[in-house]
Image: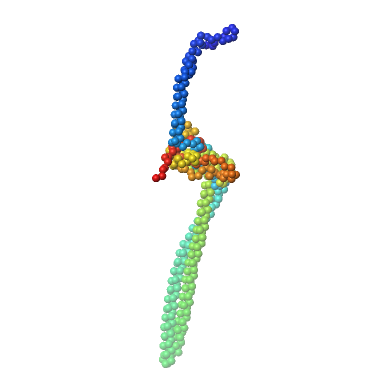
Amino acid sequence: MAPARGMDGNTQVTPEVETLQPTRTPLRAHLRNPRVRLGLAIGLGLLILLGLFRFLADRAAYVSTSDARIAADMIAVSTDISGKITSQRVSVGDMVKTGDVLYTIDDREAAYTLAEFEAEANRLRAEIAREEARIGLASSKAGSEVAARRAGTQSASASVEAARSNLETAQRDYDRTQGLFDRGLVPQSALDQSRNALDTARQGLLRAEADRDSARAEQRTASIQGEEVRLIELDLGVLRASLQQAEARVDAQRVVLEQHTIRAPIDGVIDELFYDTGEHSLRGFRVALMHDPDAVWVSANIKETDIRKIETGADVRVKADSHPGTKITGTVTKIHNATLGESALMPNPNANGVFTKITQRITVRIDLDDPGLRLRPGTMVTVRIRKQPSKTSA
């Protein structure tokens, strides 16, 4: 109920309001009581002591830092060729598998070049098949010719031996007839007939020897034709080498054609896309950025004064700013051997002589026990690493 106002404008307190005011009096009276105030002060002091105890106990058991973030292997997908982007198959945030197509680049020129190389390889294959057929025919013909000429040579040699035998017989007949003629036992006609047979035998031997020489020459000619087969085989070797070169060009061009299709190198999520359809990509420039969300870890920067208290295998408690209230645990798996300042692109050697001592930090890698939790690279976390007991030398 609102307070009533009198005719003079002053507020008048109604009886109902007067009954409410005494209810606040006991609380104020209790707060003014020295015993109550002492009890509250003691309770507050105990809470502060308890908090201080827990803080000191935590500091004694853990090394804590807020200079930590989620890290991952960020894969920069780049192109091996330059060309016009003809299609973009994915969007930022898409999950992809290894081999999924991200972009396609205009590949018409590469396809025409591949067709040209394949045609050249097919032409060489046809020439090789033709030369192989020629070798078969030439080998068969040369073999038959050589065999025939060898048989002719052997026959001519036999004819020479027969003619020589006939000449020896005719010579003996002539010598015997000459002796009989000298003793007057045979007429002149018999001697002339014997001399004619001897001359005929000589001519027969000369003719047989000439035939034998001709047969030997023809045999050598047939052997030379066999050497022609060897020449064809040498030409065939050149063609086969040219075919290998052409097939290598075909394989290389197929690689170039495949490079016009940009595929995902890993299973992961697309973080960035740097080209749109219709733009011209440049060789060696990255076209996409991606990472594997199941392979993230924590990169924590620990003070050099605390690094001696940490060892690999230490248990870690992680608090992610993006997942408040989620219990995340991990294990220290790697401790770097150099500070962040030493690995910086532009280290400060302090050449001006002005020195300010700053506590350096060393990076520690922490692998998470539950990597399936979708933590995004770059997000901040707080880590508490359990200290390892100090090792005393024996």
Q: Where does residue 288 sit, x and y in percent of width and height?
A: 53, 41
Q: Quick one: 24 or 347, which is closer to the camera?
A: 24
| Residue 209 position (above or below residue 44) | below
| Residue 237 position (above or below residue 308) | below
Could you say which quadrant of the image residue 147 lies in? Answer: bottom left
Q: Quick one: 5 or 149, which is closer to the camera?
A: 5
Please report the residue visible at 49 percent of the width from the left and 58 percent of the height from the top.
129
Specify the color scheme.
rainbow
Please report the residue visible at 44 percent of the width from the left and 78 percent of the height from the top.
160
Report the residue that reaches farthest toward the front: 34
Q: Where does residue 32 sit, x and y in percent of width and height?
A: 48, 18
Task: Indicate left or right for 222 with 86 as reference.
Answer: left
- Res. 28 visible in picture: yes
Task: Indicate left or right for 199 with 9 as reference.
Answer: left
Q: Quick one: 272 or 29, which is closer to the camera?
A: 29
- Res. 291 visible in picture: no
| Residue 37 position (above or below residue 135) | above
Q: Where does residue 91 sit, x and y in percent of width and height?
A: 53, 38
Report the residue that reaches farthest toward the top: 7
Report the residue that reaches farthest toward the bottom: 183
Q: Where does residue 291 sit, x and y in percent of width and height?
A: 50, 40
Task: Indicate left or right for 280 with 204 as reference.
Answer: right
Please report the residue visible at 46 percent of the width from the left and 32 percent of the height from the top.
55
Quarter of the picture containing the C terminus is: top left
Please report the residue visible at 48 percent of the width from the left and 67 percent of the height from the top.
226
